[in-house]
Amino acid sequence: MKKLLFFWRELKATFWFIPVLLISIAIILSLSLLYLDNLIEYRPEGITQLIFPGSASAAHQILSTISGAMIGVAGTVFSITLVALTLASSQFGPRLIRNFMYDQLNQIVLGSYAATYVYCLIVLNTIKENDQFSFIPSFSILFALIATIVNIILLVIFFHHITMNIQADNIISDISSDMSKNLDSLFSGDVNSNLENARDVSPKSLKETFAYQKEISAEKYGYLRYLDRQSLLEIAKEKDMLIEIYFRPGDFVVKDQKLGMVYSHEETTDEDLEAYQRQFIFGKTRSKEQDLEHSIHQLVEIASRALSPGINDPYTAISCINHLSSIMSSLVKKEFPAPYLADEEGAVRVIADVLTFEGMLDAAFNQIRQFSRGNPSVAIRMMESLRTIYQFCHDDRKEAVTKHAQMILNLAEKSFEEKNDLEDLQRRSDFIS
């Protein structure tokens, strides 16, 4: 089920899905309204004559105008979207393009204009008026007029949305919000509920209880985008075996590289290996679904570009640090999954490579610290952020935070030219003990 949800989210992230869906709905709706017009021969009277077309030529002209305008504006919307993608790629990094692809409003606006165009073409083709036969689809034309008004409103909303979306603060905030949602979903399960003392398990002693071992190799190269650990657990329980995984979502794997090992009491068949390999989903790019570091790397990339000599924008870097401190303050309170999965009887079935708080902290602050050499304002803000994170830390995680604070202090002592800046940073590092 989780794998199907992953594919569904990936489908919604494509730029073509919603436009094609809206065009399909427009085709069905046009045929339905034409069928209604054929059943009900409506002749406008009174004030309704001002709304419904009175002749086939008037209906033809209305639909021609609407369809021409819709396809023209659709081209404009597509061009504006490409400009936004180009700007985001050059200023904030090419890996952020996918975030704009996820934006459903862009897809809805483009799909709405294309769908209205297709709708008008279908209805336009049915208008007939001669000596033997006359057909003017009044209700279908009325719906086209309503759709046109809606599209004009959508265009205004789109212009506002796209101008807000290309602002650095909004892009950074959106990435942070997406990651906060992922935190709630990835850390909400009870994946280790069957193993109370999982972290004290000895992998070596577990492996020695099995007579056979078999290598799981990658069928293709690419980024590991999704790993169905729950399915692997169920398979391992059914076969009474142990599965060890060497990679986690976000890692890059080359073809035929060893993904893991299977330890069993009987010889593992090729069919079983294929079943294990199907639980690994690879792609050309990283995905945010199970890869928390991906969102952190996006924020780090924006900050690193902002600190480059060609841009020199410390305010954008500080904004990234602010959101990273918020994310890490939430992470420090989370219970990270143990590298072991057990069945209902408490038997360990899966050994996995998992995220750690220290690893996430390294991903968040290492590169920014390295790029902040000679930039006191960024280094001071990083120290303030670590101070904030430290306040939420349990004792076992304080060491990782103080390590990063000490590295920033060491960098400042070597690169700060102004003595007052160094003293300012040292005052903020008083939590290091």
Image (cartoon, grey):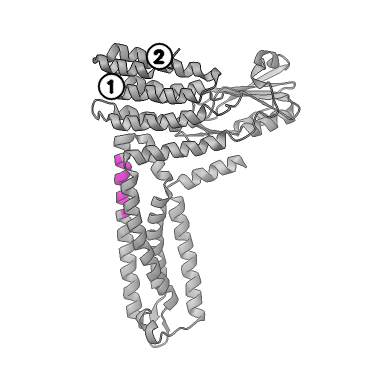
Q: Nearer the viewer, residue 151 or 424?
A: 424
Left or right for 50, reference 332: left
Q: Which mark is residue 406?
A: 2
Q: Secondary structure at mark 2?
A: helix
- Which residues are drawn in magenta? 77-87
Residue 275 visible in the picture: no
Q: Residues within 10 Å of mark 2 (few under 14, many from 20)?
A: some
Whether residue 36 is situated above or below residue 414 in the rendered picture: below
Q: Residues within 10 Å of mark 1 (few under 14, many from 20)?
A: some
**Mark 1 touching mark 2, by CB under 8 A?**
no
Residue 312 spot, x, y in % from top left? 25, 28
Q: Which mark is residue 375?
A: 1
Disc 1 versus disc 2: distance between alpha carbons?
17 Å
Left or right for 267, reference 365: right
Q: Which mark is residue 102?
A: none
Pick out the residue farthest to the right.
345
Q: Nearer the viewer, residue 56 or 430?
A: 430
Q: Quadrant of the N terminus?
A: top right
Q: Earlier in the sequence, mark 1 or mark 2?
A: 1
Q: Amino acid at mark 1?
A: Asn
Left or right for 214, reference 79: right
Q: Secondary structure at mark 1?
A: loop
Query: Quarter-wise, where is residue 83 in the image?
Result: top left
Residue 104 visible in the picture: yes
Residue 167 spot, x, y in % from top left? 31, 41
- Residue at 30% over, 18% down: 373
- Residue at 46% over, 19% down: 401
User: What is the magenta segment's predominant secondary structure?
Assistant: helix
Residue 169 spot, x, y in % from top left? 34, 39
Whether residue 140 is situated above or below residue 290 in the rendered picture: below
